[in-house]
Amino acid sequence: MNLLSRRSVLAIAAVVDVALHSRSAAKALAARHKLPPRHLEPLLQGLVHAKILRGVRGPRGGYELARERQRITVGEIVRTAMSLSTADPEDLGANSILLERVIDPAVRNAGETFLANFDLITVEQMCETAENAHVLDDEKVSGEFAI
């Protein structure tokens, strides 16, 4: 069971992908994840705004990590992706004393604990796992490798 939103999972994948490929154009990144570039671009821009990625201009431009791999955590990436969500809990209209005093605090506390576990995982660790799983080699063989 995956408790993360699709946006959060894609954000993690995008950052790890950029780290593995040193620099990635949005079009190549989207192709590797079988997404239209317009779907991924707002997420990438949010990661740039959060100083996780850096945009590189020019004909060989794209995205690169804004910091070293070991200094970026999965928790930071997930929080950034969550902040990009357009749905505001206040807009959902549900409000009650039970929600306000019991449910919301319990869910918030559990969510903080959940995210704290992601703070222990760095992009460096994710890259090592990907390298041990031969992800780059398998991308080349499957034709998903695009620079």
Image (spheres, rainbow, N blue to C red):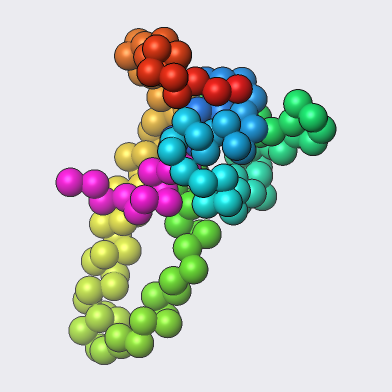
Q: Please indicate, yes or no, whether residue 67 appears anywhere in the rendered image.
A: no
Instruction: Please report the residue visible at 52 percent of the width from the left and 59 percent of the height from the top.
Output: 84
Tell me residue 96's x, y (percent).
26, 89
Q: Quadrant of residue 10?
A: top left
Instruction: Please report the residue visible at 37 percent of the width from the left and 39 percent of the height from the top.
Output: 118
Instruction: Please report the residue visible at 24 percent of the width from the left and 66 percent of the height from the top.
Output: 106
Tell me residue 75's x, y (percent).
43, 42
9 horizontally vs 84: left or right: left
Specify the segment rendered in magenta.
1-12
Tell me residue 13's x, y (percent).
44, 35
**Quadrant showing the C terminus:** top right
The answer to whether residue 86 is above or below residue 99 is: above
Q: Quadrant of residue 137?
A: top left
Question: Among all residues in the image, which is located at the extreme right?
Answer: 58
Question: Among all residues in the image, which is located at the extreme left?
Answer: 1
Camera-side residue: 59 or 119?
59
